[in-house]
Image (tube, rainbow, N blue to C red):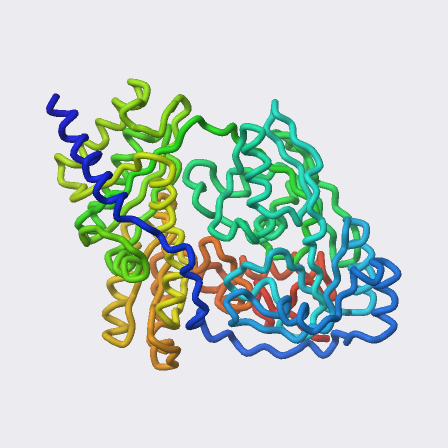
Amino acid sequence: MEKWRAADRLLKFSSRFASAVNWNNSCKSKQGKYFYSVATTVHRNPLFSSISPDDISYFKTILGERGVVQDALALDAANTDWMGKYRGSSKLLLQPKNTEEVSQILKYCNSRRLAVVPQGGNTGLVGGSVPVFDEVIINVGLMRNILSFDKVSGVLVCEAGCILENLISFLDDEGFIMPLDLGAKGSCQIGGNVSTNAGGLRLLRYGSLHGSVLGLEAVLANGTVLDMLGTLRKDNTGYDLKHLFIGSEGSLGIVTKVSILTPPKLSSVNIAFLACEDYTSCQKLLLEAKKKLGGILSAFEFLDSDAMSLVSSTTFLGTENHGREVIKDKYGQDFTCIDLRALPLEFWENLEAFLLHSVESGLVANGVLAQDINQASSFWHIREGLPEALMKAGAVYKYDLSLPLEKMYDLVEEMRVQIGPAATVVAYGHLGDGNLHLNISAPAYDDNILAKIEPFVYEWTSKNRGSISAEHGLGLMKAAKIHYSKSPETVQVMASIKKLLDPNGILNPYKVLPSSLFSQN
């Protein structure tokens, strides 16, 4: 009975807290801009050709009039990343409808040395999906067919232009889920997700796309189509080349089709929003959650008190301000009802044991358990709404880092000392997989602030054997900074692969790897 009361205290917190949550979905103000980093100066490769009338005529023979876009408004949108930070000057947007058209485009561009930038939903955060200069934009958004789905194996095969949210909806109707979920799911496309090895909210349970993607089709710079669209979970015949294209950001080839393993949809979702006094308690809570909820734990997110204050200032959110806020999302195979009191006994016992220990040991200072799907969505909106809240607050410098768990919050605290009162350091991220989203929020962009952030943040990450890009990629923003995470020998091998597959360097130039590695001879 005492165990029930201990856990029940968390349930009582729920009704008070959840009724006060009213996430304002209209919080999409364009005031302020995302400022990430001062990109290393790059110069246009003089060996690249410029678009000519003959080129336009040729592309129209392949794609028709509608597939060759020269409209100024359409080009302005395609030239600019969604943050408004990166802007190219391309005069041509091509919209192929199938792999053969992509192949013909690239074969021609390679022969003419016309640089190209592959583009999907254009939701990237490091300048990887827009031109740097006048590269031809190849947008695969018209390649959006679902080709097959096998309910027995759970393997989905689709084209690269399929919007992630549409795939999620399709699979939901079939009783399955995507192993990938992102805040940008309404716009991002699966080809871009694969090309950037997007992480997202479900990586803790389902792993990265290197594990979920069973096969893909990609077109090389010379137009050669690599058919690696296998649907087998085991295939040990030679080098597994698909992994070269997962995370290479379109610099080695354009992904045109994907086969991905999808798990069955589970019967219920439960979300707890728990407050801890400090980061050490968050780490201990994660360990306890893995021990007692390991089989049903899907995500373990965290946001610190500054992040919570920021969200509170932009939403109608009533809650006590404890030091660190932790969200846990648990999927259970036999959950039959959102009401946690109606859980099957064996799952309730696991959850009760976890909550009881967390409360009695002092790991949790306060907590909330969603009572229905609307409350659960409200809790997730808090976490997913942080980027928009930061945008509303003003200028923000964003860093996507992987760090050892025990070191992760040390960087946050040291950055606060480094920055001083000039800006606010806001931290949140995927604690379950060691991914920190470090944000420095200021009223306006200031070079003096940036000088305090960089190269400090990269040097600190390198010294602690972290990664300067956990899930966003390198793009243009961090191409010249890859040495902070990879050895010179490793980077040189990467450059050799690039030169082998794209000898003219036309695929997404100036991205991923330092331009200094490639001769213009």
Toward which corner of the image does residue 293 lie, by quadrant?
top left
Depth check: give the residue in front, 445 or 213.
445
Residue placed farthest to the top in the image? 345
Toward which corner of the image does residue 155 lie, by quadrant?
top right
Asked whether, in this view, residue 459 is left or right of residue 150, the answer is left
Depth check: give the residue in front, 191 or 478.
191
- Residue 120 point in image, percent of width and height: 63, 56
- Residue 31 point in image, percent of width and height: 42, 71
Give the position of the N terminus as an image quadrant: top left
Report if residue 339 is visible in the image. Answer: yes
Q: Which residue is depicted at the point 64% across and 46% down?
A: 162
Report if residue 239 is visible in the image. Answer: no
Q: Which residue is depicted at the point 73% across and 63% down?
A: 503
- Residue 388 point in image, percent of width and height: 41, 61
Asked whether, in this view, residue 416 is left or right of residue 28, the answer is left
Indicate whether 162 appears above or below 113: above
